Structures are given as C-alpha cells and as structure tokens.
Amino acid sequence: MTNVVVLIKQVPDTWSERKLTEGDFTLDRESADAVLDEINERAVEEALQIKEATGGEVTLLTVGPQRANEAIRKALSMGADKAVHVKDDAVHGSDAVQTAWILARALGTIEGVELVIAGNEATDGRVGAVPAILAEYLGLPQLTHLRKLTVEGDTLKGERETDEGIFEVEASLPAIVSVNEKINEPRFPSFKGIMAAKKKPVDVLTLAEIGVEADEVGLANAGSSVTSVTPKAAKAAGEKVTDEGDGGTKVAQYLIAQKII
C-alpha cells in the first residue's frame, strides 16, 4: 500500500454544551472543548494496521480552522506519518457537498493515494454523506459503514452490518472506505509518539492552492441553511414515588398512564 489517507475532523467534545452562533446559526466551535472525533481515531487505527501489514504511509487530511491542528497532532501521535490541513476563512459554513468538494481537490495534491478511510459520520453534524459524495466526485468505488476491513492485494473486502443482516462487500483499489465504531479499538498515543508528532510535517493549504474558488464554498453558497433555532426545553423535575409497600404498583400505574406499557 503506497499511501492511505485518513479524513479527520475536530469536533466539539460530546461532554461540552453545543450551541449555534447567533446570526448565521452555524455551530459555535469556540464555546466548547474541541477533540479529535472518536470515529476518526478508529479510522486512523485501521489505516495504521494496514500500514503495519502492507507497508506504505498514512497521511491525514482535514478541513478546518487553526484550532484543528490540535486534532492533527493527536492523530500524528498515534502513528500517522504526515498531514494536510486545508485552512481558509472562506470554508466557514460549508455544507457536506462543499466539504466533499474541498476534500476531493485536496486529495489531488497528495501523491500515491490508494485508499481513503473516513468515519461513517461526524458527531457534530451526523450527516454521514461526505464519504459517498467524495467517491462520486472522484469516480471511485466506495465501501461504507464497515465493521470489518481487509486488504488482499488490490482488493478490499469488508463487512457491513444493517437491520437486514451482515453483508460482505468488495471493491478494487483505489477506493473510499468509511468505518463504524465496531471496526477496532484505537491505540493510545505513547510518550514517544507524542514527542515525534511535534516534528512530523503538516502541509497547510488555502482554497486557492487546491484549485477551489471562494464562491464554490462557504455559507453564502451552501445548498442548505438554518434560518431559525429553538432552544431545547429545560428538563422538568421527575415524579418521586414513595414506596410504602405498593411502590411497584405505583410505578406500573405511571408507566401505563404514559402509555409505555
């Protein structure tokens, strides 16, 4: 394997309060702690396992503001070799279609790409469409939502679990793959890996440098937009049941009244 590219994304921590910014209703990324998306850690782990089995190198690719460099360094400390960071203010507010277009153009600057691995969906938007859109732009086969992946020469084989059962899927390289949370358990960065990550190359590119025009991306040119938001309702106090020997009956009556049973 010459070069496995992993798509990564920095997202607000799921334990932080997430909210939209006033005015344009885009995700307020500065108000919450930011982390490398957990599903991306699994994508990086899968790429590293392929590298260990077949050789080659692992390149990270992300689109985001300066702060996204923190996620890049986390993934580099796991063992990835280098990274490409598309950083441009004009990206702000881009939708999934525009993001996939930026990624497609950025991939054109990376040499020897045989396989692209992504998570099945990011935890901040949960659109789950970028890998498929990217495959369409590049004209490549795609294996999505995989719980297992193996590389046999120029052939990829995977397992996809659905409500109807487990499907065995196959594609030829080069290809796009997305993985789910069952694919593996990501490794923890070692101290040596953390120190080494500080010296690994990160190529920072603007939209102009990858051949993307500013009017092709961004909030003003997105195919969808948020026009208003309603705060979620405050949590109401629960109903306390005092057990006086008939607690089970009271709970059952409450569940029946709520049509739960």
Image (tube, rainbow, N blue to C red):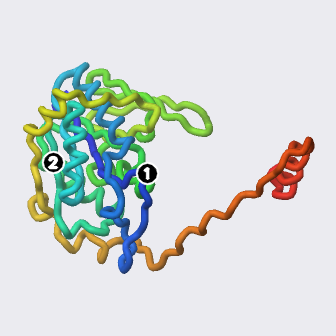
**Does residue 18 appear left or right of residue 202 in this picture?**
right
- Res 116 label: none
- As shown in the figure, which amino acid type bears the numbered disc 2? Val
State whether residue 14 is above or below residue 81: below
Residue marked by disc 2: 84
- Residue 113 visible to an observer of this rendering: yes
The answer to whether 207 appears left or right of 46 in the picture is left
Residue at horizontal 36 percent and vertical 24 percent from the top: 150
The residue sitting at 35% across, 30% down in the picture is: 186
What separation in Å lies between label 1 and label 2 (alpha carbons)?
25 Å
Q: Residue at x 21, y 47 (%)?
A: 61
Residue type, label 1: Thr
SS for dot 2: strand
Q: Where is residue 142 in the image (x, y as percent from the top left)?
A: 36, 41
Q: Which of 158 and 240 is in front in this view?
A: 240
| Residue plotted at (21% across, 60% down) | 65
Above or below, 184 against 76 in this view is above
Q: In the image, residue 56 lies at what x, y percent?
A: 16, 27
**Element carrying mark 1:** loop
Dot 1: few (<14), some (14–19), or many (≥20) neighbours within 10 Å?
some
| Residue hosting label 1 | 14
Q: In this view, does 64 lie to the left or right of 167?
A: left
Answer with mark 1 or mark 2, whichever residue precedes in sequence. Answer: 1
Quarter in which the N terminus is drawn: top left
**Observer-nearest residue: 240 or 179?**
240
